[in-house]
Amino acid sequence: MSGGKRTNRKKRMAENRAAREEALQAERELQKYARRYGELANGYAFLREASGAAEFSAASGKILYEFSDSRTWLDFSKQKKRAIAKSLHGGLLLALAALMVLWFIVSFIYRMVTEGDKGAVALSMLPSLLIVAVCAAILIISVLGEWGNFVRFAFSRGLVARGKDAMERANLAAMRADLARADACKPYENAITVYRDYLCFILYGNKYVFKKQLVELEVKRMKDELSLAFYTDGVRTEFPASLPAGEFFLLNKAFGGKVKTIRSNTAADTSYNEKGQRLYGGDTLGSVIAGAVMSCVVLAAGVAVTAAHYLWIPEIPPFLGLFFVGGAGLAFCNTFHHIPVIDIVGLPLVFSVILMVFPPWMLVWIEGTLMGKEVTFLHVLLNCTPQAAGFVFLSLMGVYAFCFALNKAADYMRFGKSE
């Protein structure tokens, strides 16, 4: 055996030993954590004897609110998935998917009947078929609540692009890490689910169900997180996981506005960076001011482009000014996202208005100005072009998002204020 082969063999053996040792170390760490969380879980055994305790079977029915530290924002519980599929908005999304497919079929039949070259028609409709199929798949996955599993599948099969720039790659890495964290937490899950008459806690993997009217929930905001505690038989028990601060109004709504809130220490909740500068949602005051100025610049550009179209240069697309105005709104919301009402209400409203207005306007301009066609409802109905399919889908999603944002705004105004 040559010296090079012996060296390679020794190297592979060393790598295999290192891999086995790493696997054993990971197994030991897992056992250590399992023992630790098992001990923590045992500390809540007294809750099963509380006067408000109920049978596990009572935790059923309509879910008013749920949170789990072993699920990401893309994940839902099995009960929630079934509820979404049976809900009004779930049925609406399925109806939209069916209408998209029906639209394509009507357009295809019309063109096959009215145009001579059948093969050319079939080939020209393939891009539209692809876009309609993607749109319908997006709607169906949303109704089934399977975005978490879909994204996990895409990551595991290498179907997710690496990212065009450093920020995009960082966002993808953060999403992958969040999914891995949630999956690792499943055996030691901490969760809260609110039903109409019952309240279900999962504490380090163990389930506890209570009659809701016999449990008092206490919430305190600590910086950007919510600290929860609940009272049963006069005993205060802290919930082990922290919730995002934006969840407060949803949780308060689920309890009918009867959540007990504790006024936090404003000074203690103020964040500072390593230089001692106060942070506003993770940004310094200088960054916030710079973001606000940039938003105003983008807004001024939008107004100028719109004025230029109507006064001096009609060749400029009229929707281009709206694009800048909408971008200014999104930039403003991003700059002041540390203000709850802007983050929870303002951002969805601005985004939904952009989707409602920008795509149909762009479609009319492309079909009417560039292609010289008369854009009517009948024309769009009988011509499911790729751009029409994409823009109509975005517009419908804008209407759906606008209704959702209005409902969210109403809930926030009722339940978003803490005493």
Image (spheres, rainbow, N blue to C red):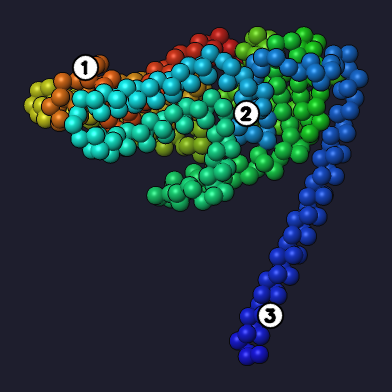
Which residue is drawn at the image coordinates 15% and 31% (left, top)? Answer: 370
Instruction: Answer yes or no: is residue 257 visible.
Output: yes
Query: Are circles 2 and 1 on residues that touch, CB within 8 Å?
Result: no
Query: Are circles 3 and 1 on residues that touch, CB within 8 Å?
Result: no
Marks 3/1: CA–CA distance? 74 Å
- Residue 153 figure quarter: top right
Which residue is drawn at the image coordinates 58% and 20% (left, top)? Answer: 84
| Amino acid, disc 2 | Phe
From the viewer's perspective, is 23 left or right of 86? right
Marks 2/1: CA–CA distance? 41 Å
- Residue 380 figure quarter: top left
| Earlier-in-chain disc, 2 versus 1 | 2
Mark 2 or 1: in front is 1
From the viewer's perspective, is 173 left or right of 379? right
Mark 3 or 1: in front is 1
Name the residue beneath numbered marker 3.
Answer: 10
Marks 2/3: CA–CA distance? 48 Å
From the viewer's perspective, is 149 left or right of 26? left
Name the residue beneath numbered marker 1.
Answer: 376
| Amino acid, disc 3 | Lys
Q: Position of residue 34 (x, y in %)?
A: 82, 44
Q: Secondary structure at mark 3?
A: helix
Which residue is drawn at the image coordinates 73% and 70% (left, top)? Answer: 17
Name the residue beneath numbered marker 2.
Answer: 76
| Earlier-in-chain disc, 2 versus 3 | 3
